[in-house]
Image (cartoon, rainbow, N blue to C red):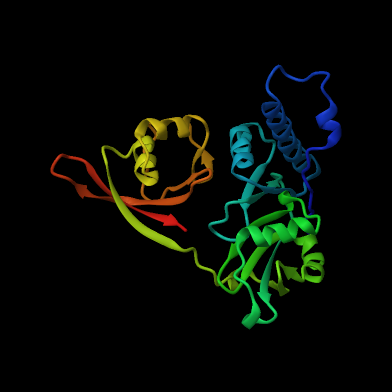
Amino acid sequence: MARDRLLHRTSSDAADTGNRPAKGQGEYQDTLFARHLIDLSRQAQQKNIVLFSDFLNLNELNIFHRQSSELYSGFELYGGYELSERQMIAFLPDALCYTWKFPISCLKISPVNRKFAEKLSHRDVLGSLMNLGMERSRVGDILVDDTESYVFCQENLAEYLTENLTRIRNTTVLVEPAAPNEVHIEPKLEVAGGIITSNRLDSVVACLCKISRSQASQWIRSGKVFIDNKETLQVTCECRPGDLISIRSVGRFRFLDCRGETKKGRLKIQYERYL
């Protein structure tokens, strides 16, 4: 039976400044967070059990990937479905001798009366969850369609949300468990194309976001761009077909392929933009 371990940055950690490294508050918090992940890995290996993190955002996942060489155990990442952005880490001991699963539940949210239902947004659903006292780290991705929404959350929250989430804005809703394979919301995609000088990351980002290459380089170097959920600081990194490119405050794109060259030798590319 999988054992759930919640990961929190505690107030005692924040108050312990005696041996604080000489770096900014944000960097210090990142260091503490990395230590928590390594400690979970150590405990999983020593106790020979599977331990889990909370749902991690892109920045936290990047901190994890930077520390992965220091882990004591193996690991797997999952957020409830294939293209999840917020993901949970399972720390796996070498001598694991029992079956386990991620403690993730999927909840379907639908209006009780569709005739009088409002069109709800991601922000509406998240706001209602936060109003119930949920910590963001305990809730994964939220998928919203015109009539239904799906929320991925920690398994031990599912019953509470099913019973207590009854209204979003002015719409009375019904919350019920759903298997991940019942999620019928397909990502809304827009296929587009562009012309780039090379498949370097700075050139691709400039094309995707309709910005200058110099600005794209600034975004990359500042840690704003991720490839397959991993921060990429190198502007010269080459994009490959199938790469998922996430840009903070902008959105997500799938780099598909190059479709030939122009007369001037530039590359014609095709990509998908997640709406």
The x, y position of residue 13, in whole percent, is 82, 31
The x, y position of residue 120, in whole percent, is 62, 67
Asked whether residue 98 is in view, the answer is no
Q: Seen from this angle, which residue lies furthest right?
A: 12
- Which quadrant is the N terminus positioned in? bottom right
Could you tell me which residue is drawn at 52 percent across and 34 percent down?
Answer: 223
Q: Is residue 254 left or right of residue 37?
A: left
Q: Which of 118 and 210 is in front in this view?
A: 118
Q: Is residue 274 left or right of residue 200?
A: right
- The quadrant holding residue 185 is bottom right
Q: Seen from this angle, which residue lies furthest left?
A: 263
The x, y position of residue 259, in whole percent, is 24, 52
- The quadrant holding residue 144 is bottom right
- 146 vs 14: above or below: below
The x, y position of residue 130, in whole percent, is 75, 55
- 88 vs 177: above or below: above
Q: In this view, does 250 lie to the left or right of 208?
A: right
